[in-house]
Amino acid sequence: MLEIARFEWGRRARGTVLLSVAFLALIALTMGLFPSIRETGGELDAYLETLPPEVARAFVGDVTTLTTIEGYLVSQLYQFGWVILLGIYFAYAAGSTIASEVERGRADMLLSLPITRARFVVEKFLAFVPVVVAVNVVTFAAIYAGIVLVDESIDLADMAAVHGVSVLYLLACGGIGLLASVSFDSVRRAQTVGAGVVFGTFLLDSITYDTDYEWLGALSASRHFDPAAILVAGDLEWTGILVLAVATVALVAASAVVFERRDLQ
């Protein structure tokens, strides 16, 4: 069982390590700057108040101060690193899962395997689960170590909740990339569409938030993952968690159906 998923995970192990190392470097740099921000953050807080609400929500998150460790982590790490960078990364990476098989002419071999196309798609996606979990576990440990080193404290339950919900968020982004991957023969096009949809809907969420068109932002995965609400306000929104879980399953199921019906000849 899950032979394809295990094989794909093995192929992605090196990339997982590199991605984790890159984020460890980002975390080290970010945490190293916090002591100076804590001392002189009043000026930055004043600057935050001058930003247009759409810009502040998109790139800083719903925080009002950078001088607390919670607000600092949301604005400098989670909002940019997780919601934007990792969201786009996993949508982009998932865009190559199926499209690469078609583009490289391995479709005939796929059709000869004693498995259904739907199972092939699902197992390809499942290979992303340990990647997403591993990156979150490693970064959680690194962030907590950084918090201790800068002589701060944080609610570990809230921090764990941020990473837990981010797993669902990133898998939903991967589902978007997967749907693009089964829809296009070109890897580049599938990756561009997957990443573009994630970033485009993120901007849509930011622009329409708290307007008459706010309902449009509900189409974005980022609407349902709010690090500030969890880490700063301690508010875990279960409806958003459910939406992310259902959306991920729906995207994978839709990808399986589309691939089943495609003519690969």
Image (tube, rainbow, N blue to C red):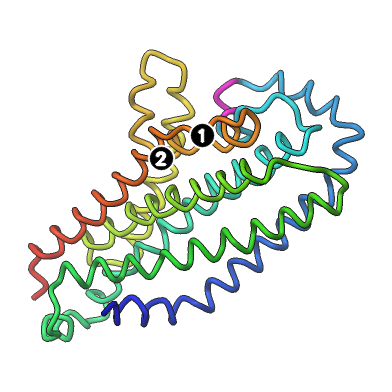
126, above or below 208, in the image:
below
The CA distance from mark 1 to mark 2 is: 9 Å
Residue 197 is left or right of residue 22, and the answer is: left
Residue 228 is left or right of residue 265, and the answer is: right
Question: Is disc 1 surrounded by few (<14), some (14 to 19) or many (20+) residues within 10 Å?
Answer: some
147, above or below 116, in the image:
above
Residue sitting at x 17%, y 81%: 110
Bounds of the magenta segment: 53-57
Residue 10 drawn in magenta: no
Q: Quadrant of the N terminus?
A: bottom left
Residue sitting at x 55%, y 30%: 235
Residue sitting at x 54%, y 51%: 85
Residue sitting at x 12%, y 81%: 111
Residue occupied by mark 2: 241
Q: Position of residue 156 (x, y in %)?
A: 67, 46
Question: Is disc 2 surrounded by few (<14), some (14 to 19) or many (20+) residues within 10 Å?
Answer: some
Q: Amino acid at mark 1?
A: Leu
N-terminal label among 1 and 2:
1
Residue 191 is left or right of residue 38, and the answer is: left
Residue occupied by mark 1: 236
| Most foreground residue, 244 or 97 | 244
